[in-house]
Image (tube, rainbow, N blue to C red):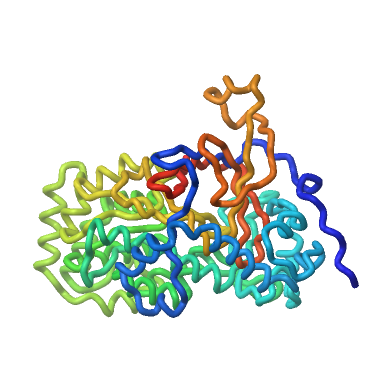
């Protein structure tokens, strides 16, 4: 059967209201050139902080080639999948053919294909390689969590993001061979009709062997055993995270969680249970509140009677004024607090700063359930000013220029969400222009092709010739 002719994007493109915004602001150069590390799977096994930074800097001017190469790899891997085959690419992998043939879509358009995969269709529907699991997004479609395909390539891009941002953080705040008090949790894992595991994207990452290796590489091994992370009861896991963190209090160098609100919630809980935690440490016996057998067994192995540590923790807690600076007080070797702190997490920063005292807060990287977009390589910036370098080898990124009708220019300050934008054809990552607004479109290695993100605002600026996104 001959492939059908490609349809132009203008014919297929859907109207967008309340779009993702990107503004490019110039700080030195007018040409957008991306600075990015390219870390092969072989090099990732021998991790060197300096080599990550050196490669990031060496490839500053190569974003265009890396984007073309990323698209070629995606289309070669998935070109025989039903979705792309029916669009008439006919084996072509160049950006021009891709833009001519593949329409812009939302998750709703891809949902029937993803559902078939979840229901057990083993044929190449969206990807050439099998989808290994399903991620459940935090967003909703028709009142239910979105299903998103997840595979090993997404794990690899996650690890690249982690390594890249850590290399820059460690240059600012070096850490040694310590541990991380990570308030991380596995969500419930269910099986789809076709037998695939469906859970959150973070849980899919946590249960991968690559995650454990990377945490060891970047000296961020969790104080808690896996049984706590993957425990079925959130409150019991949280209590044990706090307890394990206190047991290893002198070794902890990083306090982190996926989101800022999780860290705040953890220390609000500490305010309520600190005396019980001291008793556990003093007597070497785990609280009766921990009833999940796997959690109880794993944490009990870490506990031995330690009255001196219990006394130290108790005395420090009673001396605190309204729990200000509790983190550096109880974890004296901690260098910083880390997690996603931008966007909807910003309201938690005031309370988080209260707990952190003099410790710096560092915002984690930028992405979504559909995949990662950028790494925080400017860790010295406070979370409110955090920026993220878009990595051109973890996906293929395009930007739709948006123009406001002249009569609506004055309305921007009142309510950007009500403005109807005039769209143009997408441009590439290195083609963005100063003082233009854009909507982002992502194509990744897991079958998400030409997906745009509504209801999210991002601004881009150019710093030292490098485009960064600033989440609003």
* Relative side of 29 to 101, left or right: left
Residue placed at 31% from the left, 45% from the top?
Answer: 381
Relative height, residue 25 to residue 372 (above, below): above
Residue 239 picture quarter? bottom left
Front residue of 108/421: it is: 421
* Residue 380 percent coordinates (x, y): 29, 49
Q: Position of residue 271 (x, y in %)?
A: 26, 50
In this picture, residue 391 sits left or right of residue 4: left
Residue 90, horizontal then vertical, whole percent? 79, 68
Q: Quadrant of the N terminus?
A: bottom right
The x, y position of residue 379, in whole percent, is 32, 52
The reply, left or right, for residue 355 in relation to residue 135 is left
User: On the image, which quarter does residue 136 sit in?
Assistant: bottom right
Q: Residue at x 19, y 62 (%)?
A: 278
Residue 343 in view in this figure: no
The mark tally for this picture is: 0
Left/right of residue 403 with respect to residue 120 in the rendered view: left
Q: Residue at position x 39%, y 79% from top?
A: 45
Taking depth in this image into account, of 113 and 249 the one nearest to the observer is: 113
């Amino acid at each position: 059967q001959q492939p059908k002719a490609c349809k132009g994007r203008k014919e297929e493109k859907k109207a967008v209201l309340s779009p993702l915004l990107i503004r490019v602001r110039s700080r030195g150069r007018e040409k957008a050139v991306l600075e990015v590390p390219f870390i092969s799977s072989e090099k990732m096994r021998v991790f060197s902080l300096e080599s990550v930074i050196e490669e990031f800097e060496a490839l500053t001017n190569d974003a265009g080639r890396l984007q073309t190469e990323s698209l070629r790899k995606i289309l070669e891997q998935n070109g025989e999948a039903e979705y792309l085959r029916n669009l008439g690419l006919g084996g072509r992998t160049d950006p021009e053919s891709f833009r001519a043939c593949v329409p812009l879509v939302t998750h709703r358009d891809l949902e029937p294909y993803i559902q078939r995969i979840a229901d057990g269709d083993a044929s190449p529907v969206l990807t050439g390689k099998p989808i290994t699991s399903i991620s459940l997004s935090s967003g909703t479609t028709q009142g239910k969590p979105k299903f998103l395909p997840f595979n090993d390539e997404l794990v690899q891009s996650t690890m690249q993001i982690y390594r890249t941002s850590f290399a820059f953080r460690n240059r600012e705040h070096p850490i040694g061979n310590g541990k991380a008090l990570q308030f991380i949790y596995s969500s419930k894992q269910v099986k789809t009709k076709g037998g695939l595991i469906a859970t959150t994207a973070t849980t899919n990452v946590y249960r991968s062997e690559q995650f454990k290796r990377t945490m060891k590489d970047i000296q961020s091994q969790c104080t808690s055993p896996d049984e706590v992370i993957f425990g079925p009861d959130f409150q019991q896991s949280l209590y044990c995270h706090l307890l394990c963190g206190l047991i290893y209090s002198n070794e902890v160098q990083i306090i982190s969680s996926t989101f800022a609100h999780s860290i705040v919630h953890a220390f609000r809980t500490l305010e309520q249970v600190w005396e019980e935690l001291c008793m556990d440490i003093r007597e070497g016996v785990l609280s009766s509140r921990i009833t999940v057998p796997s959690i109880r067994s794993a944490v009990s192995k870490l506990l031995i009677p330690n009255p001196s540590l219990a006394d130290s923790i108790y005395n420090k807690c009673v001396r605190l004024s309204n729990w200000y600076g509790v983190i550096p007080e109880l974890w004296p070797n901690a260098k910083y607090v880390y997690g996603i702190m931008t966007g909807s997490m910003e309201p938690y920063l005031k309370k988080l700063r209260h707990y952190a005292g003099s410790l710096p807060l560092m915002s984690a990287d930028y992405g979504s359930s559909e995949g990662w977009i950028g790494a925080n390589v400017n860790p010295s910036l406070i979370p409110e000013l955090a920026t993220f370098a878009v990595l051109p080898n973890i996906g293929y990124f395009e930007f739709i220029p948006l123009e406001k009708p002249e009569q609506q220019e004055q309305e921007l300050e009142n309510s950007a969400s009500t403005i109807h934008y005039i769209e143009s054809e997408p441009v590439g990552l290195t083609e963005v222009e100063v003082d233009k607004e854009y909507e982002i479109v992502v194509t990744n290695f897991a079958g998400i092709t030409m997906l745009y993100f509504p209801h999210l605002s991002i601004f881009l600026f150019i710093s030292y010739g490098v485009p960064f996104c600033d989440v609003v």
